[in-house]
Amino acid sequence: MDNEPKQSYQSESGNFSDMEDWEKDIAKVLKESKPLSLPPEKMQALLSMLKPMVAERQSPPNINPPIATGRMRLGEFFRLVRNQAYLLELAYWIVIGLMMVSNLALLASNRLQSLFTMLFLILPLVGGISMVYSLRISHDGMGEIEQASTVGLKRIFAARLTLIFGLELLLALPLLIYYGVQSGGLVLARMAVAWLAPTVALSGITLFLFSRWGEWPSVGIPVLVWGSLILFGASRAGFIGFAEMVLARIVFNPLLPLLAVLGLTAGLAFGALGMRRLSSGRYSWS
Amino acid sequence: MDQLPDETLFARLMKGDEEAIEVLFARYAQSLYGFFWRLTSDPSLAEDLLQELFIRLVNYTGKLPQHFRVWLYTIARNLSYDALRSQGRQQIHQVDEFDDDLDEIQDVMQNGPEKTALRRADDERIRKSLDQLPDVQREVVVLRYYQELSLEEIAKVTKVPLGTAKSRLYHALELLRGMLTREEVKDG
């Protein structure tokens, strides 16, 4: 490392007040010497070459045709949802079907409460994963069709969101009805909140993660976090049983409304961020 | 547009504003050419490097730099060193003959030999002296006195602590003084 000189050299260009005489002289001599300059015609030629390159940087033309902006009738929207459902693969429908059958079977048997509760608790994860699944990018050429659609990415996005939440509600409904019938309206309301808030929160966070880092982190992180919470809860159930503990927490926990509000807010905020990014027109979801 | 800060202009350039490149070009092109020339001592290479630098600028897609000038000179410096490395650092020095005349004798009588020598140093001699400085010292001198960067900016461009930048400048000036006065005495 060079030795630190005693001079401060803090002066602005041209002000040599804090320098010694010889340094001022050298600095002045240096400043007065003229550098070689490029002839104006060469400068002009270079600038002329650069300008078209800059012009090319302008935002590429939007390849979408004009998007319908008027209000969409409800019937039209549900037709769009139905059309989007065709994009979901058979394997997905089989998984959803199996979950529904398990739900109903467990309810009908009125036994295996822990399994039943576990199913209830993993529903928010199913919602988040379904979201990623419905928006994932594959290479089957659907992207171009979406981009070219006059419906617009935002409406397609809304249709898929509706589809996923519809299926999620379908899965949750038997469980909610069961608790409602068993324990009354207040329990039903609290159970509904305990399902809806984590579903919205996990779906929103998953959507945001998906928009930023793609499929695997967006699935892996929520599964890891939510799964750990479930397992942690199960390990602390003790003698009263997992199902009873979860039910007691949902019904009697005074913090549930606050946590639900926080979950909903976080989910909606992250979801909005993710949606804005995904709807910017630079992405396709199929 | 002329009044806009560099960072704003560059942001506009990144969005395809042709006027922004005109202003930035007017602001920096000659100065950068001088910088390249002083570091490489090769006018043709300096021209190539200037073109390369501006092509990089107009094609840049990364994050908007916070301090455009520092960022610009950092790129310019790296380009210069890359070019010098690839050329094996072969520089051609053309030494002009220096004249002495009656005025010079009068100068010596009035100001002493060292001051006179400095006053009489012409552009070519200064360039030749600069060429003889070690790279790290020459770049500091060029950035300070020709590109008019502050020492803080120089430290950032050259990626050294502020103290090191000051130290390099100090030693460079000492060396230049020796070279310029010695040359003059020898020529005289």
Image: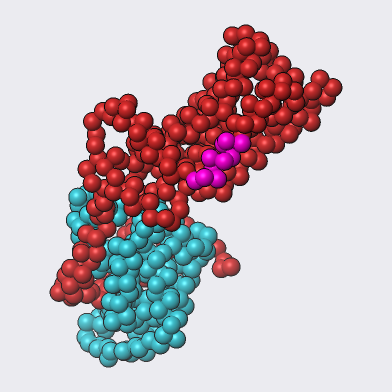
Please name whichever residue, A100 or B88, is drawn nearer the observer in this view of the structure.
A100
Please name whichever residue, A81 or B107, is drawn nearer the observer in this view of the structure.
A81
Q: Percent from the top left, x then y, of residue B162?
A: 50, 58
Q: Which residues are magenta?
A: A89-98
Q: Quadrant of residue A157?
A: top left
Q: Which residue lies at the image location 38% right of the left edge and 55% below the top edge?
A: A141
Please name whichever residue, B128 or A103, is drawn nearer the observer in this view of the structure.
A103
What is the image's colouring? by chain
Q: Which residue lies at the image location 64% right of the left edge and 28% below the top edge?
A: A103
Q: Residue furthest right?
A: A239
Q: Could you say which chain is coloured red in the image?
A: A
Q: Percent from the top left, x then y, of residue A73?
A: 28, 27
Asked if B110 appears above or below A275 in the picture, the reply is below
Asked if B92 appears above or below A190 in the picture, the reply is below
Q: Could you say which chain is coloured cyan in the image?
A: B
Q: Does the magenta stretch mainly form a helix, a strand or a loop?
A: helix
Could you tell me if residue A224 is visible in this image?
A: yes
Asked if A212 appears above or below A98 in the picture, the reply is below
Say if the magenta span includes residue A117: no
Task: Quadrant for the N terminus of chain A, please.
Answer: bottom right
Q: Quadrant of residue B105?
A: bottom left
Q: Which residue lies at the image location 24% right of the left edge and 64% below the top edge?
A: A53
